[in-house]
Amino acid sequence: MPRVLLVEDEEHLAAGIRFNLELDGYEVETIADGLRALERLVPAPDATAPGLPIDLVVLDVMLPGLDGFQIVERMREAGNYTAVLMLTAKGLPEDVVEGLEAGADDYLPKPFDLPVLLARVKGLIRRREWARGATGGPVRVGDSLVDFANLELRKGEAVTRLTLLEAMLLKLLVERRGQVVTKAEILEKVWNLNPDTETRAVDNFVMRLRRHLEKDARNPQLLETVRGVGYRLSDELSPR
Amino acid sequence: MSEVRQLSRSRRPKWHYLAVGVVLIVVALALTVAWGILAAPETAGPRAVAPARVIAYFFGSVLFLLLIAGLVLIVLLLLREVRLNERQSNFVSAVTHELKTPVASLKLYLETLEYRDVPSERRAEFYRTMRQDIERLNATINNVLNAAMYTDRPVAEPRPLDLARLARRAAELTLTRHQLPKTAIRFDGPESLRVAGDVQALETAVLNLLDNAVKYSKGDKLLIEIEVWGDMDGQAHVRVRDHGIGISRTHLPFIFTRFYRIGAEVRRSRTGTGLGLFIVRAIVKGHRGTITVDSPGPDRGSSFTISLPGLLEPEAEVDAKPEAAHA
C-alpha cells in the first residue's frame, strides 16, 4: 500500500485530503509543521525510529517553521528523491517555477479539483515507475552513462543523482534522440502543465542537464537548442 | 543558511536603490572636496583673491550641499516606497491565502460529499467544517471592507453611546465566536460610561483587539482582561490585555501600519491579513482618540489601550437632543 506524507497546516484541508486519500487506499501520515516534516523526511543520523518509507509527499507551501520550497530543497540536498506534489494558494507562474526548481515533481494550485488531486497523486506514483521504467539498462549519452532505474548519472567516477523531473526530461530526449522535441511537448509530458504556460522552467532544466552532461554547458555539443522550436539530443554516441 | 537567503531575496531591490544612492552621494561629496582642493592653492595663495571668486565659491558650495541633501532625501523616499511595496505584496499574498484556503476547503468537502459515499456521522462533521470555513471567509471579507471604509477622517455624526456596554457586548460576542468558556474574558469597569461616537465602528475596533488577543494567546493561558474607565481629563479608556505570545520591542512601532505582519509570509503560523490593527487605529483616529500598545516582551502578553476624548456626563442622556429641538 503506497504511503503518502501530507504536510499541511490548515486542519480542514488536511482532514479532507486525508479522508479522500485513505478511501483510495493510501496510508496517510499528516504533519502540520515544516520543521517536523523535514525531520520526518531527512531524519537525523542518530534518529531512533526513522519511520516507514514514504512514496509521495503532498506538500503545502505556506507552513509554520519552514516553508515548502525550503523543505523540498533540503530534502534533495540530503539525497531524498521521494516524489513531491506541491499545493499552494499562490497560483502565480513564478511560484510554479520556484516550486519546480526547488525540486518538486508536480504542482497544484489551491483551490484544486478533488478528482485532479487524486489523479495527480496516482500519476506521480506511476510516473516514478515510468521514469525508472525499462529502457534496457543504462543508456549512454555523450561520455555519461544514465541509469534511469536508479535515477543516476555516471561520468567516469562521478555519480550524480537526478531528480525525477530531470530524469523524465532526459528520458523523453533519449527516446526521441536526433529529433527536435518542442517545449510545448516537454511541458505537457514532463511537467504535466498546459503547453502554453509561460515559464523558463524547461530552459532551466535543460541548463541543469547540460551541466551534468556537457563538457562546456555554455557551448553544448550534445543537447542543442533549436531556436524557436525546442531541443534536440544528438544521436551520436560520443561528443564530436 | 537558507534563512539568510530568504531574507536577501526579499530585500535585494532595496539594496540596489541604497547602493546607487550611496554611490551618488559619495561621488558628490568627493567632487565637493576635490573642488575645494583644486581651488585651495589659489585661495591660500597671495592675499589678492578676488572677492567675487570667494562669493562664487561660497554659493557654489551651498548649492552643491543642497544637491547632496536632495539626493539623500530622494534615497530615503525611495526606500520608504520600496518598503511599502514589499508590505503591499505581502498583503496580497496574505489575503490570497486567507481567501483561497477556506474556498479550497469548501470545494474539497463539497466534492467529497458529491463523489464519495460519506457515512452520516462524518457528514455532520463535514458540514461543521464547511460552516467554519464560511465564517473565516466572511471575516476576511469584512476586514478588507472595513479597511476601505474606516479612514482617519472624523466620524461624521457622533452619537452618545455606552462604551462599557459596548465592551461587554464585544466580550460576549468574542466568547461565542471562539467558543470559549465564560471565564476566558474578565470585564472590569463601571455599569455605564458614555462617550460620543460611531457605535458600530467602535465595536469593530474593540472586537478586533479581542480577536487578536484570542489569536495570539496560547491555549492553556487564555485569559483576556478588558477594562473600561473614565478619567479626570474627560477621557474614556478601553484596555484589552492578554497573556499570550507578546510583541518584541523591534516590532512595536510598526504594528499599526497597514499590511504590517510579523515574520515572513510564507512561514506564517497564524492567519491574518495585516489589516486588523490598522483598522483599529483608523477608527480611533476618526474619534480623535489615541491607541497605545505595551508588551513586556515575547511570551509575556500585550495590552492595547484605546483612549477617546469627550467623556459625557451620565445625565447627558439621549433625550437631551429632542428637548433642545423643542426649545
Image (cartoon, coloured by chain):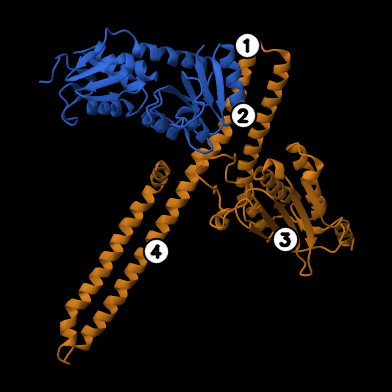
Residue furthest bottom as drawn: B47
Give the amino acid at mark 4: Leu
In the depicted structure, whether residue A109 falls above or below residue A171:
below
Instruction: Check contact, mark 1 vs mark 4: CB within 8 A.
Output: no
The residue singled out by tag 4 in the image is B73
Mark-to-mark CA distance, 3 and 4: 36 Å
Chain B pictured colour: orange
Mark 2 and mark 1 on one chain? no
In the depicted structure, whether residue B25 falls above or below residue A36:
below
Seen from the viewer's position, the closer of residues B117 and A72 is A72
Direction from residue B18 to residue B184 in the image, left or right: right
Give the amino acid at mark 1: Arg
Which label number is shown at residue B308?
3
Instruction: Check contact, mark 2 vs mark 1: CB within 8 A.
Output: no
The residue singled out by tag 2 in the image is A11
The residue singled out by tag 1 in the image is B116
Give the amino acid at mark 3: Leu
Q: Residue at x 16, y 28 (%)?
A: A215
Mark 3 and mark 1 on one chain? yes
